[in-house]
């Protein structure tokens, strides 16, 4: 009985082996039939399904197995071997390919582990005689399952296709040829070339401005911003936009791609830092550099939801800049309405009420309504009286037109008002917008509520700003035109000195006081000044603290290379004048005790400084009140600005900065007006001097290694060294 059972079990194993082998041969035959039309798909499936390791079972012999080499796919599908296989078959695969014939095929590797050893070779040998599949099946190529296709061998060339759409591959190939070897044809700056190589290399040189030859949303946004550059006071001609519509070849598309990138760089750089560098205008301008990073420009603009807005963000963010931009649009929109002409007539003068019971005199004239319209006075537009409001508007117009500001409507003023001024005003607004680009993007200190000081030289006003609002303002006296012009700069106020010593700057010592000593050796003594001569022969002159000190009672210190500062003055009468350019370069403040209390309450809010407390410190000893956090001081030159009432104001170009900049913009060739013209740094050398007989020399002079003027004025450390590549500068020192 046991022998029968053993015999039966052996017969079952042989039968199962025959069935498995028959299925393997059938599957191999089917594979051969479809190999011509879907070999890639079959290989993908073969690679995706793991093969079991062969078991240590001897293969069946030829006497045990008789292969039917004429079996077709259809025959194998109907072979009655499913039940015996069910007990020992391996788990079914996750994916089974269904061919167009409607018959499911299973790879031979799915036969039972113990019975599939060495079955691949017989199947391979028999595929040559397999019956071909029906013609209908050959007409429909098989598609590999998506999850199987992901597991193709790494040797297949898939990298380029994964990053570059096939339609853009020719353009990417051209960009790869150009970038690195020929990028200098498009970009002059090394950092921009490096940024382009990095950016495009990371995306396998796929174009960013076009896709399948059509403009992307980012490209449309950039092009729109470049074409609208004039609205921000820039020149659209400096940022040419390539003709993508005419670019029909990969070469042309690659060329247009890099040209648009170059124009985008130029716009971002000049929108942020200016079309010209401040050093081209004058040697007494010093603002911190804030260049754009081309890597950041590429990343920011190409990934932004609105590329136009992203590129526009490189323009100054300040409110006063945006107000000028709006007024520029209004000026360019003028000319469509009727032209208002003021007729000739008698001079019109307004006389205010006097102290000696003199009555106010208001004349009346039919031209006044036209004058009100011309000067932008909207209140009482039809009033014919030449009152205080009209006279003040005329005076401001005269000041901006560089006419003597009398407030009298005379023939010269009428002619100036009637002369087309729109183009000149546009030029003035443009250069003022340009100067805003030189200033830091963040004028204030966040930890102090964005507090900062801003002084406008042509308007002779100083304002303290905090949290976007003006918290205090005062009148100032600024430097005389010429060698004593107040410099334009941004620095930080670090401390206030009460009862300052006036260390006379070398420019005044050698240009004014020493020549005066030749005429009168006692002049300095009578002025209360002290002269010291060092062992090296150099001279230092100072004035001790006191009521008569030229700096008054308070000095506001923001150490800078021009040696200027803000200070009090014993000479108060100049603040009553409309034009107040009288100093040697420093800025005199009308109400210094109030100014000091405002700044101290910002820097030291818990100390509760009042003007009275500041005045209580007046005496003969210097007192330094240091700020834990320095407050930025911005010295600006705004000849055009929008006032609190929303009206565009113009001021006299007292230093000729507008004229210089307009000339550069109109006559500069090319788009690279921002090239730096190196200006030298101040010199603190102390030339030896032979004093005339009779000059009183104070004891206690310093040796040749004693402190220079900067150290005497602001203390250590000395000014920062000149930037690399700059030449030493002739001495320019300002004070008072």
Image: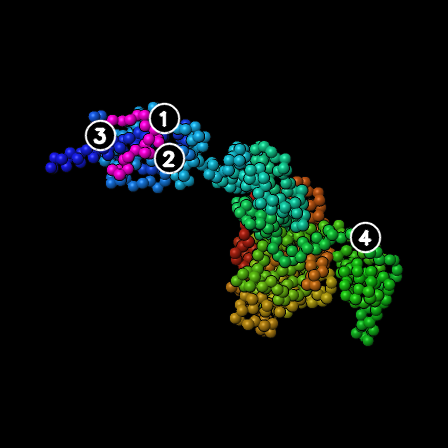
Q: Which residues are magenta?
A: 64-85
Report the disc number at residue 419: 4
Query: What's the distance in space between the residues labelled 1 and 2, CA to CA?
Result: 15 Å
The answer to which of marks 4 and 2 sits earlier in the sequence is: 2
Q: Is residue 77 in view from this perspective? A: yes
The answer to which of marks 1 and 2 sits earlier in the sequence is: 2
Report the disc number at residue 59: 3
Query: What's the distance in space between the residues labelled 4 and 2, CA to CA?
Result: 94 Å
Q: Which residue is mark 1?
A: 131
Query: What's the distance in space between the residues labelled 3 and 2, CA to CA?
Result: 29 Å
Q: Is residue 715 left or right of residue 81?
A: right
Is the Cβ of the residue at disc 4 closer than 8 Å to that at disc 2?
no
Image depth: mark 4 or mark 1 in front? 1
Q: Is residue 441 magenta?
A: no
Near-viewer residue (431 or 265): 265
In the image, residue 625 lies at what x, y percent? 54, 66
Query: What's the distance in space between the residues labelled 3 and 1, CA to CA?
Result: 27 Å
Query: What's the distance in space between the residues labelled 4 and 3, CA to CA?
Result: 111 Å
| Placement of the N terminus among the 4 image quadrants | top left
């Amino acid at each position: 009985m046991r022998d029968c059972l053993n015999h039966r079990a052996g017969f079952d194993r042989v039968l199962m082996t025959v069935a498995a082998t028959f299925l393997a041969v059938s599957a191999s035959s089917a594979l051969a039939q479809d190999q011509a039309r879907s070999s890639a798909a079959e290989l993908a499936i073969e690679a995706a399904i793991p093969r079991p390791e062969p078991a240590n079972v001897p293969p069946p012999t030829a006497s045990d197995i008789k292969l039917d080499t004429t079996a077709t796919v259809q025959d194998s599908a109907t072979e009655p071997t499913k039940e015996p296989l069910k007990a020992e078959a391996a788990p079914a695969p996750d994916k089974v390919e269904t061919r167009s014939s409607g018959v499911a095929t299973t790879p031979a590797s799915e036969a039972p582990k113990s019975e599939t050893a060495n079955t691949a070779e017989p199947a391979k040998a028999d595929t040559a005689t397999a019956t071909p599949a029906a013609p209908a099946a050959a007409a429909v190529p098989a598609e590999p399952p998506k999850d199987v296709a992901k597991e193709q061998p790494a040797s297949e060339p898939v990298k380029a296709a994964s990053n570059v759409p096939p339609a853009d591959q020719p353009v990417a190939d051209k960009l790869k040829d150009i970038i690195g070897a020929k990028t200098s044809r498009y970009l002059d700056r090394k950092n921009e070339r490096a940024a382009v190589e990095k950016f495009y290399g990371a995306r396998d040189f796929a174009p960013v401005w076009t896709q399948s030859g059509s403009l992307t949303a980012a490209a449309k946004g950039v092009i729109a911003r470049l074409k609208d550059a004039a609205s921000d006071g820039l020149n659209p001609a400096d940022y040419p936009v390539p003709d993508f519509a005419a670019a029909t070849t990969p070469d042309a598309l690659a060329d247009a791609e890099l040209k648009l990138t170059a124009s985008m760089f130029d716009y971002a750089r000049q929108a942020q830092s200016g079309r010209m560098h401040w050093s081209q205008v004058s040697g007494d301008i010093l603002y911190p550099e804030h260049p754009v990073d081309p890597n950041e420009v590429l990343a920011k603009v190409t990934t932004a939801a609105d590329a136009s807005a992203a590129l526009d963000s490189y323009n100054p963010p300040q409110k006063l800049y945006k107000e000028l931009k709006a007024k520029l649009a209004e000026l360019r929109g003028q000319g469509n309405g009727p032209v208002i002409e003021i007729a000739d007539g008698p001079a019109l003068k307004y006389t205010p009420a006097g102290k000696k019971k003199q009555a106010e005199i208001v004349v009346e004239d039919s031209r006044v309504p036209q004058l009100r319209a011309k000067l932008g006075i909207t209140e009482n537009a039809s009033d014919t009286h030449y009152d205080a409001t009209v006279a003040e508007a005329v005076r401001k117009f005269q000041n901006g037109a560089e006419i003597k500001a009398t407030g009298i409507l005379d023939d010269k003023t009428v002619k100036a008002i009637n002369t087309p001024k729109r183009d000149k005003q546009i030029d003035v607004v443009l250069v003022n917008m340009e100067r805003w680009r030189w200033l830091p993007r963040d004028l204030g200190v966040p930890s102090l509520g964005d507090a900062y000081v801003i002084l406008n030289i042509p308007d002779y006003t100083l304002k303290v700003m905090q949290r976007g609002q003006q918290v205090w303002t005062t009148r100032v006296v600024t430097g005389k035109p010429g060698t004593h012009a107040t410099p334009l700069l941004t620095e930080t106020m670090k401390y206030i000195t009460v009862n300052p010593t006036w260390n006379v700057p070398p420019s005044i010592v050698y240009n004014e006081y020493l020549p005066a000593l030749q005429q009168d050796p006692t002049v300095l003594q009578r002025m209360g000044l002290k002269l010291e001569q060092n062992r090296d022969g150099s001279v230092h002159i100072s004035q001790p603290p006191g009521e008569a000190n030229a700096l008054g009672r308070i000095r506001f210190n923001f150490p800078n290379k021009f040696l200027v500062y803000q200070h009090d003055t014993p000479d108060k009468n100049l603040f009553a004048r409309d034009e107040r350019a009288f100093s040697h370069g420093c800025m005199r403040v009308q109400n210094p005790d109030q100014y000091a209390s405002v700044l101290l309450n910002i820097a030291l809010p818990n100390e509760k400084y009042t003007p009275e407390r500041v005045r209580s410190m007046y005496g003969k000893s210097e007192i330094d009140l240091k700020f834990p956090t320095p407050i930025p001081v911005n010295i600006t030159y705004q000849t055009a600005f929008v006032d609190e009432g929303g009206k565009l104001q113009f001021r006299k170009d007292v230093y000729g900065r507008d004229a210089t900049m307009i000339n550069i913009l109109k006559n500069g060739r090319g788009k690279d007006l921002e090239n730096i013209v190196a200006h030298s740094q101040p010199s603190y050398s102390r030339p030896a001097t032979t004093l005339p007989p009779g000059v009183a020399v104070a004891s206690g002079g310093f040796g040749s290694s004693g402190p220079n003027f900067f150290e005497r004025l602001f203390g250590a450390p000395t000014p920062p060294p000149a930037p690399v590549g700059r030449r030493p500068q002739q001495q320019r020192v300002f004070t008072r």
